[in-house]
Image (spheres, coloured by chain):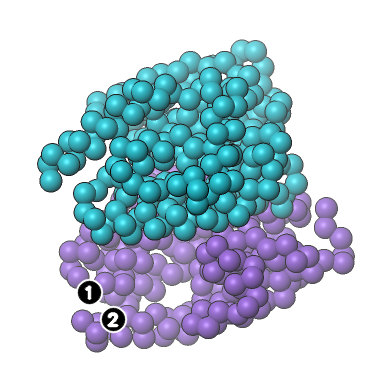
Chain colours: A purple, B cyan
């Protein structure tokens, strides 16, 4: 559907798991695009114009048509460029991929962030429990190398948050969010994912991301 | 894709907006199915088997394959039965439909419920404000008779919550959640929607739904 005369850009921030999801999808498809670095403390006119509802990144812009919400962007990319499918073709498998991606957003992302971004012991524990419960479902769900089978698919892309970001939160916060002994299959999957050639190329370098979240955490502790 | 030998069932509760969404989709497609009435105070083995993750309704079961989450079910139905399309065919229009449906779930459903299900004045106000802000975006978004154009589509189905349930909450709770003078286009749309022949046939009767929520609200006030 796409021609060579495409104007493609991605408004984002390096280090955001949601932006990284879209970058993985675009790299899997082999699509070139312009990365427009946003400053979330001083949002650009372009971001406010293209995502007036949420004013958040990522926003993918295809020939001046903007799309927000990482999972919606990925479905758009998959429907627009056919090579290296990200979603399965059968409606039932597709529904399952959507279900588990939504599950990660609803049950893992918020709880992991809340467990990390608090100094209240009860809040840490409650949210850690929620993450562990959610990860147990995912542990039981992995049947192959990836959630998508032999190749990475929508759920793997959504779950890059678990493979790359959650271990960073775990280490900085001294939390037990993603213990490898408790989730051996999920741990193995996470190593496969972050070492997948496409994902590896797109992931932000760990050290600066670690330093960024460590600084946020320390300022939280200091303000206690 | 579907043959005549289908086994179709919907696990649900009459009066649930999420179940109603799926019922509208099935009716639009002209699909016959078995409605399995659940008791949420005493969930059936079938529900626990078919939705072990969330243990919630609706669950749509197609030849013993279960799908949960109303919007995911609707996309599955639309992809499996081609007649009377619910989502647009173009990927960009499809992305927009998904965006606004998710917006309704993220920004309207929770806030409207919280505004209604509290006696704390500040919580009522805060959540009412959130609903009004979200509805303003939807007011600006209506261009035709329906969000889907001349026919109802995914966003209209998702928004049946606004057309039918929110006015009930508003009346019982004495709230200003969906004032028709503030949102004339959305109000007109809501009347078109609830009087659409398919929606009208599927909507639960208003009186018992009203009585059900009134009883819940009164027990909340009494327990204050």
Instruction: Identify the disc placed on residue A220.
Output: 2
Using residue A7 as the reference point, say whether residue B111 is left or right of it: left
For mark 1, what is the residue? A119
Q: Chain of mark 1?
A: A
Q: Image point 57% across, 15% down: which residue?
A: B32
Residue that lies at the very extreme toward the top in this rendered image: B5
Task: Judge the density around disc 1: few (<14), some (14-19), many (≥20) Cα neighbours within 10 Å.
Answer: some
How much space separates mark 2 and mark 1, taking CA atoms? 8 Å
Q: Chain of mark 2?
A: A
**Disc 2, SS:** helix
Is residue B195 placed above or below A191 in the rendered structure? above
> Which image quadrant for residue A46?
bottom right
Using residue B151 as the reference point, say whether residue B201 is left or right of it: left
Q: Image point 38% across, 69% down: which residue?
A: A167
Please say whether residue B21 is visible from this viewpoint: yes
Residue that lies at the very extreme toward the right in this rendered image: A4
């Amino acid at each position: 559907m796409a021609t060579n005369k495409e104007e493609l850009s991605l408004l984002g921030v390096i280090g955001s798991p949601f932006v990284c999801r879209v970058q993985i999808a675009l790299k899997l498809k082999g699509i070139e695009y312009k990365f427009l670095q946003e400053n979330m403390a001083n949002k650009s006119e372009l971001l406010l114009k293209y995502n007036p509802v949420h004013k958040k990144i990522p926003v993918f812009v295809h020939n001046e048509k903007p799309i927000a919400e990482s999972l919606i962007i990925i479905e758009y990319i998959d429907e627009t460029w056919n090579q290296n499918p990200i979603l399965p073709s059968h409606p039932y498998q597709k529904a399952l991929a959507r279900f588990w991606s939504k599950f990660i957003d609803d049950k893992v992302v918020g709880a992991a962030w809340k467990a990390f971004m608090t100094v209240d012991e009860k809040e840490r524990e409650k949210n850690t429990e929620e993450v562990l419960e959610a990860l147990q479902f995912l542990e039981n769900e992995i049947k192959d190398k990836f959630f998508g089978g032999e190749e990475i698919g929508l759920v793997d892309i959504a779950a890059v948050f678990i493979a790359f970001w959650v271990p960073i939160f775990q280490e900085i916060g001294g939390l037990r969010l993603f213990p490898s002994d408790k989730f051996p299959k999920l741990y193995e999957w996470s190593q496969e994912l972050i070492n997948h050639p496409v994902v590896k190329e797109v992931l932000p370098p760990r050290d600066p991301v670690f330093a960024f979240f460590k600084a946020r955490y320390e300022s939280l502790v200091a303000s206690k």
